[in-house]
Image (cartoon, rainbow, N blue to C red):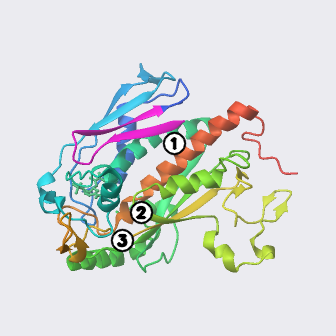
């Protein structure tokens, strides 16, 4: 199951091609609405105010409402670009931005907004993962859910999955939402940005998905999450917390009725254990901020850069559906690879020694 995307944030459209999707899965354009809305800009005052319709057109790979097994092409037309916002930055490099490295690599400046490096590209990952999530749920009962686990220095003081979809932050503790609103309002007014942590959990993943050496499930998951814009760190299970643990504490002891804990995050030796697969990622604070920053321009001069336009004071707020998407895309790929090599041996039958 492979996905590639195309398009730029200020080009005519963005899209993706999905190859290797099993045939016979029911898919219609309405299936994409919920997750695309969860990720979209302009849904609260705490995110970018760009208003995109994000209407998916299915161009191929689906016939009479079912996947055919041939490549699926999805297209979303951009409807609310404002390239004029970027007029001033065609000659300069925004500090912390990919426009510097794209220029060093390709020698070409795309002045139309963030272009390929814009988080707009993640729309298509979420769209592709709608198909992956649906197959995983129908075939294996797998659910993939995420939440915002830290906003700057604010951490959840309680946890309830039901709270997560009831507020614009994907925050798991309803009582803290007014404090988050206040913190974000103050941050936005200051013109600055803040980082975040997003956690993502897949449940009902059967044991056996993943490859032992090349293509470890945790390796692929780390690469997939790290490929999301602004992600600077990924943890699986206890992650960096393992540094200070003892073996007696970290190892997940086994009893006849299952594992006693899940420090491993559901993966041992690159292969799923049948426990929830748990990952966490750190997102940097948005580089596009109103506070002037020192940089250089194409003429080799020192300049101060202020990034205007419609930006997110915390990109992490919209990252929860994107993290879920990348987890789902990795899981469906490994589910299909496992089935190809081992058939359905072990699937849905967690077998402990
Ligand atoms: C983004 C910059 C802003 C955001 C954009 C991500 O867009 P623009 O290119 O108009 O400045 O609105 O997010 C989206 C449009 C989206 O759909 O996620 C960036 O630089 O990453």
User: What segment carries the magenta color?
Assistant: 1-18
Residue 260 found in image quarter: bottom right
The residue pinned by badge 2 equals 170
At 56% from the left edge and 28% from the top edge, which residue is drawn?
Answer: 22
Query: Taking 125 as reference, is 67 above or below it?
Result: above
The residue pinned by badge 3 equals 285
Whether pointer 3 and pointer 1 mark residues with C-beta atoms closer than 8 Å, the reply is no
Q: Position of residue 227 (x, y in %)?
A: 46, 54
Q: In which quadrant of the rendered image does the N terminus lie?
A: top right
Q: How far apart, in angstroms, are the residues tagged by discs 3 and 1?
A: 29 Å
Dot 3, how many residues are within 10 Å of its Cα: few (below 14), some (14-19), or many (20+)? many
Residue 9 painted magenta: yes
Query: Taking 308 as reference, is 341 above or below it?
Result: above
Dot 2, how many residues are within 10 Å of its Cα: few (below 14), some (14-19), or many (20+)? many
Whether pointer 1 and pointer 2 mark residues with C-beta atoms closer than 8 Å, the reply is no
At 24% from the left edge and 76% from the top edge, which residue is drawn?
Answer: 293
At 43% from the left edge and 79% from the top edge, which residue is drawn?
Answer: 154
Q: Position of residue 150 (x, y in %)?
A: 46, 73
Count of residue discs: 3
Task: Confirm whether residue 163 shows in the render.
Answer: no
Q: Position of residue 334 (x, y in %)?
A: 63, 41
Q: 32 and 236: which one is in front?
A: 236
Residue 115 painted magenta: no
Task: Choose the circle earlier in sequence order: 3 or 1.
Answer: 1
In terms of secondary structure, where does tag 3 sit? loop
Dot 1, how many residues are within 10 Å of its Cα: few (below 14), some (14-19), or many (20+)? many
Query: Taking 16 as reference, is 67 above or below it?
Result: above
Task: Choose the circle earlier in sequence order: 1 or 2.
Answer: 1
């Amino acid at each position: 199951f492979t996905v590639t995307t195309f398009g730029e944030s200020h080009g005519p459209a963005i899209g993706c091609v999905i190859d290797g999707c099993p045939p016979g899965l029911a898919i219609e354009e309405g299936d994409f609405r919920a997750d695309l809305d969860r990720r979209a800009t302009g849904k609260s005052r705490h995110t970018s105010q760009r208003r995109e319709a994000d209407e998916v057109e299915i161009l191929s790979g689906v016939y009479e409402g079912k996947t055919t097994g041939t490549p699926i092409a999805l297209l979303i037309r951009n409807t609310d670009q404002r390239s004029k916002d970027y007029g001033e930055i065609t000659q300069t490099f925004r500090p912390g931005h990919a426009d510097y490295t794209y220029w060093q690599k390709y020698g070409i400046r795309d002045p139309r907004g963030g272009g390929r490096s814009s988080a707009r590209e993640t729309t298509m990952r979420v769209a592709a993962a709608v198909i992956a999530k649906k197959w995983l749920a129908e075939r294996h009962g797998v659910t993939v859910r995420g939440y915002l686990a830290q906003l700057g220095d604010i951490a959840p003081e309680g946890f309830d999955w039901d709270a997560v979809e009831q507020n614009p932050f994907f925050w798991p503790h309803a009582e803290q939402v007014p404090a988050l609103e206040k913190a974000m309002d103050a941050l936005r007014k200051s013109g600055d940005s803040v980082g975040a942590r997003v956690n993502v959990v897949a449940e009902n993943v059967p044991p056996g998905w993943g490859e032992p050496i090349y293509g470890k499930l945790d390796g692929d998951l780390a690469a997939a999450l790290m490929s999301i814009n602004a992600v600077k760190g990924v943890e699986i299970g206890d992650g960096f917390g393992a540094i200070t643990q003892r073996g007696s504490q970290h190892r997940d002891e086994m009893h006849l009725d299952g594992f006693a804990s899940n420090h491993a995050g559901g993966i041992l030796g690159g292969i799923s254990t049948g426990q929830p697969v748990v990952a966490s990622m750190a997102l940097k604070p948005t580089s596009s901020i109103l506070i002037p920053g020192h940089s250089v321009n194409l003429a080799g001069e020192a300049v101060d850069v202020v990034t205007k336009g419609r930006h997110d004071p915390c990109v992490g707020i919209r990252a929860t559906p994107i993290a879920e998407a990348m987890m789902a895309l990795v899981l469906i790929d490994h589910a299909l690879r496992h089935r190809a090599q081992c058939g359905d041996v072990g699937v849905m039958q967690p077998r402990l020694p």
